Amino acid sequence: MALLFLGACTARRDATRPPASARASALTVRVQRAVSGTGTWSLTYELPTPSHSVRFTRPGHGFRQSHWRVVEPAAASIERQGDEDVLTAPVGSPFRTLRIEVSSYEVKPEKDYQVFLPYSDGAVLFYTGVLGLTSGEEEPQPLHVLLIPRPGERVVVAGQSSEKEVRWENSPQGTYAYFGSGSVVREGVTAVVDPGMPRPLREHIERLLPRLFTLYTARTGSPLSFEPTLFISFGSTPRPGSINMSGGTLPGLVQLDIRIGANRLADPEVTRRLSELVAHEAAHLWNGELAVHEVAGGDWMNEGGAEAFALHALAELGTLPGEYVRERISDAVSECLFLLEGAPLRESSRPGKYTSYYRCGLIISAMAGASARQSRPEADIFTLWGRLLRDVGPRGHYDEERLYAAFASEGVSPRTLAVIRRLVDGPNTDAESRLLAELRLLGFEPRVCDGDSARTSSCVRVGRVPFLP
Ligand SMILES: [Zn+2]
């Protein structure tokens, strides 16, 4: 989920543009859901100048041909030209108003956002990225989107929630806007959780969200410089035993879609996994958006950091038992060593190895937190990242050297930093013995499993996690 990085850059560029009022006329689109019936939407564009044709800025994957109908100008159609969709008016009749009716389609294109994401109560998330267009050869213009809720419903977008029309300036990558009547969490985060989720699970998540965002803000000492939004849709899946959690991130936004089989609806594992997923993705708002990195092979920083934020916060909030956290860290040590196979961690971008960034990254974060705590009892993973976030400032960029510097300033010892650097840069032929020695010095009480597994050489259990009570 690395789409955040682009978003941060674009948001900054948008901020330097003159306000809408300073321009003669702007490109606008009204988005309205049909009052009756289920799946019809109307899009009404006003172009700044008359045009013979417009080009959509994002691919339509064939749906602009099958599910979009041009109402005005009459006799215009949307043609697919390679990856691009182009709408052309009949010869000699330029247009300024463009009206399109769209029947919703609930299909996830490969490597792109699903345009209509249903909630189980009839509410819908609409992806605004699909709206972007340009007329002629000009640079893409900013698109002013007017989102109009149906009577009795509201629109929730980018931290706003309103029963009236909401205005939002689209970015090229777009965002999700919620249209529906579900209840909205508005404390630390603006969130809509699907009311069709089993009630204990929904109530748990709705209680967790404000506490989680408050904890991240307070403990890093770094409030987000934007209004975070989180959407969780829910549905069933035909396979009774399956748990399927997917989602994506966009600037300021976490979107999750949860599908649970009938036999798992009351399974505590669902609660744990969803809590971890929410806490992990929320952590990226701090380590992938409030601050950003673009280091090739550096995803161990944000992925490992997010894993550590999630486990630490959920243990502290009482959502995850200490025993479970110890298991997760034990598994992370074992899997990290197993996946590395002696290679430097930074080379894990290749297929089949990406999980190393999560596992080894979590161990690095846990070691850094424990090392800092040995010199400053109040230090933990949040104070380490809090230091980095203050060092680089809102929307600032970091890299490994800046992270190590923040670690060092917060009390991580030169010895622990050397172990971390070696894990990241290699060589790692003797990674297991070095890692175990350091974990021992930091109080994790690691031991190699005695069992009979074929992976015995990479099976390690930790007896203690220093940040747990
Ligand atoms: Zn992540």
Image (spheres, rainbow, N blue to C red):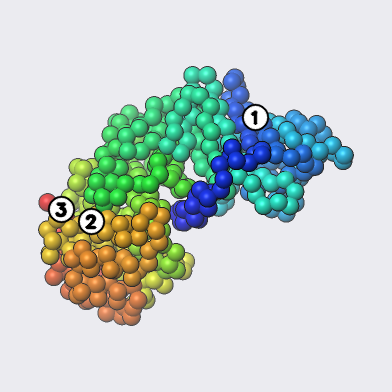
Q: Amino acid at mark 1?
A: Ser
Q: Nearer the viewer, mark 1 or mark 3?
A: 1
Spatial CA span between label 1 and label 3: 53 Å
Taking the spot 39% from the left edge, 35% from the top edge, the residue there is 191
- Which of the two residues, 392 or 191, is positioned nearer the viewer here? 392
Badge number at residue 42: 1
**Disc 2 marks which residue?**
383
For residue 230, what is the image quadrant?
Answer: top left
Instruction: Residue at the far right: name it.
Output: 92
| Residue 411 seen in this snapshot | yes
The answer to whether the residue bearing label 2 lies less than 8 angstroms from the nearest atom of ligand 1 is no
| Residue 452 seen in this snapshot | no
Left or right: where does residue 324 sit relative to residue 158? left
Spatial CA span between label 2 and label 3: 16 Å
Q: Nearer the viewer, mark 2 or mark 3?
A: 2
Establish if 228 lies above or below 448. Answer: above
For residue 415, what is the image quadrant?
Answer: bottom left
